Image (cartoon, rainbow, N blue to C red):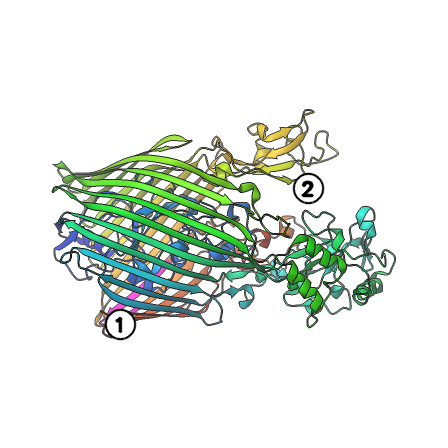
Amino acid sequence: MPTRSLPLKPSHLAAAIMLGLAIPGIGLAQDAASPTENKARTLDTVTVTGSRIKRTEIETQLPVTVLQKERIDQLGISSAEQLLMFLNIAGNGSDNLASNGGIVSEEQRGNNGVSGANLRGQGADATLVLLNGRRVATHGLKGRAVDLNSIPFAALDRVEVLRDGASAVYGTDAIGGVINFITKTDYTGLEASTFVDVTEEGGGNIFRANLLGGWGDLDNDRWNVFGTVTYKKNEILRGTDRDFSNTFQPDRGLSPDTRGTPFATVFSLGSTGVGATSLLRNGQLDPADPAVRQTAINILDLPGAAGCESGGDMMGPYDHRLWSSAASRYACAWDYPAAAIIQQPQESVDFIGRATFKISDNHQAYVELVGSQVDVEKTFEPNQISSSTSTATTALGPATWYPMNATTQETYDMVYDALAAYFGAGNLNYGAPIAYRWRCIACGPRQIETTTKSYRFLAAFEGSLGSKWDYNVGLSRASSKSESTLGSGYHYTDALRTILGSGLLNPFLLPGQEQSAAAMSALDAASAAGVMLYGGESILTTLDATFSGSLGFSLPGGEVLAATGIDLRREEFKFDGDSRVDKRPIFNAPFDESNILDNVSRDIKAVYAEVYLPLLDNLDITVAGRYDEYDGFGSTTNPKVSFKFEPFDGVALRGAYSTGFKVPSFNQLFNGVTETQYTGLDLADPATCPTGIANPSVAGCESIRPVELFGGKEDLQPEESTQKSFGVVLAPVDWLNVSVDWWEIERENTIRSAPRDILIQYYDVFADNWIRDASGEVVAIDRRYINSGGSLMRGIEIDGNVMGDLAGGTFRLNLNGSYINTFKTKALETLPYTDNLVGDYVRYYNLPIKWKHTLTFTWQKGDWSHNLSQIYRDGYNDELPVSVRNNSYIPENWNPRVSNYTTYNYSLVYSGIERMKLTFGVKNLFDEDPPFTAHQNDFAAGAAWETRIADPRGRAYSLLMEYKFR
């Protein structure tokens, strides 16, 4: 669109701004002046993320990181997920596909195939993602966060990341910041590019191809049409492809907590009831330790036997000391965390097309269509068959115990003889079926295939209203529709129970032995592959208008500028569960019937205004405010004030204060209620037993076993936040600049599933959550979502550049780092904050490491450019192993500290061939493995490594080839 240009004579500070200091980080401005250049420049007016006002001084009040496409390509980054893992300002959350590779917590459930943006550790649902300055639909399965996999990454021109709250400008979700993916707006010509990223150890390779074409010149033809299509494929990377992915490291405090093994473990269920009918009655007294009765026995691990390792790949002894289970001394375990997929296979096609028409010299119209299809295959370990339990709700039950019959006689006697040889036949019940736990390798790995189809159609007008004001008006509709279907590894429960109960499937096979053809045929017939698990769609319809320009008067520092606008949105969401007519149960299939939502929606009306006040030549202030009105919540008003002050040439101070908010998602509001039976014997009524811990010797502390209720609550209110920042920018000479920005984010009224320990500890506040019958007995605990408590985070972000001439070329040395010094939470608004969690292991969500940085050296001469980067991630205090937590056993080589993680990347760019550009790169130059961590695998992905910190691919080689046909 037409823009007005103003002259800008850069001092050292202005030069620093243009060179990237005010837009700091790894994405230094690629069109910046050379380090030695010192002449007047003319800059077009632009709109930078975080402000609606067009101005020439690019972002001096707010910290914005700008990453040009050229720089992204130099780093070998091929997706938005990789970019977020690389950025220091991004939090270390479970927002990548590796973190969502297996069984996940309730909050992450339904996030199949989703990669999210998480700035400053506030979460993907508190980070606003824009495409060309406008919202896109959130992912169809959850409706809480934008899926970065749907962003047309190869078509980007640049990425702008606002490292500050922006609810005063953009509304909800902008607590952690804003990331704006900006594509080309017009293009003439034809070019193609291919990209390969191949690992040295194999697995996890990445391929991409892109074609871009455009026709028409806006100035001469008064129109331009361009389009670009990209195909991308990520190949699978299995946990077994990497040596460090191994949880059998008991001497360091890590061992898999499972007795479901490819060669089954025999279980005892007691001397009475259903247990009395099994082969192993009431366990076996251990001749080596008569005081302990063994209740979980794998005959491979008995004294003198071949050992657990002989039972198949990834089998080993169950570490009974680490898990404080003396009765499992002769059990085996299986490395199920390493059986998960590190990099999920992904295939995607995306398209963006835009047609722009110049109506007159001051007005133009354009239409834009963005579309994508992303296919992701989530693969994790085969089902564990726990026939050793007596309930069919959590397992297949006693009907599946291994029987003695003509088919099974030989195997049955082998198991019996091994047990009798060591323990004696006293407690064995020959002829009774065998209760066991077994990892059904023959059933195949569990797979959930998710297809997401997304689009956004935009029609807009923009231009100038006279000589003082610009406008932009747009109408858009966006959708993200996802479906998850079952792949291999899932079977109809009744058919599987029949197969197991008949003895057709043999859980006691050694490597080299195979299931019978009849067994495999029966498994195939029982397969539920292809059944739709669930699906959903998120739809966003928006009408927005922005007006920006001069208010017609000046202050001592210059012209007063302003922007104002409206934002009208309708958000819609629906979630479909099991749509089959015949709803035969499928074993362990994670259906979500209780959370079916049928076309829920809400309307949002917003108006905002922003004024830029240059009070003095060296002092300017921007004041912004936004009023939002939501169906069902009422209204909220959020202000923002920011400033820039230059007391001396080469020195600038900047800062901001704002409030923000985040509305509840549709799931948090409307999810159905699910009931889960509390099965422990350690819970007591906090009304009569303040600790809530059962103790039969204390009156009022008798054990209770209520059901727990989970789900949405329609009376939830929005979260609120307060953001503060203060920074210093120094540019004393033209070859050196430094910026330091302090920030604070405080969130209140946070939305979360009610923690049981909080409901106990603050019973007087949450008494209504303990539901009682007429006699006063607790029958249920309401653990649905609540607004309660808050969090406080503080940190410092640093960016520095040194540049100059070197060996006939130019160089730049950039350090960009993020330091977190405070992360505290509180259960209630009236309570003080807890101890600082920075540097400690935190499950599920953001891992608050203290320091992370990128140090980059770039040298350019002629057609050649060399780039060497160091990426550093600080160490932290590991999660305590169970035995250490219980003070029962300390592993010999256990280290409470996870080491830091440092990798180096190198790239070489050559542009000396006409119309062609080549970029060669080596990632993880020294092939550094992720640091070891002993975190408990049932609560986090990664077998002995942390998916939120490390790149598991190892050394990889990349090549990007770009060719312009015209």
Q: Where residue 203 appears, x then y in whole percent?
A: 49, 68
The nearer-to-camera label among 1 and 2 is 1
Q: Where is residue 122 in the image (x, y as percent from the top left)?
A: 42, 45
Image height of 793 relative to 191, above or below? above
- Majority secondary structure of the magenta segment? strand
Mark 2, residue position? 680
Is residue 211 one of those drawn in magenta? no
Q: Give the labeled residue for mark 1.
A: 916
Name the amino acid, label 2. Answer: Gly
> Is residue 763 left or right of 48 when viewed as pictured?
right
**Residue 852 seen by the camera:** no
**Amino acid found under the numbered disc labelled 1:** Met
Q: Residues under labels 1 and 2: Cα distance?
A: 66 Å
> In front here: 397 or 943?
397
Is residue 649 something that shows in the picture?
yes
**Does label 1 or label 2 sit earlier along the sequence?**
2
Assign the C terminus to one quadrant of the image.
Answer: bottom left
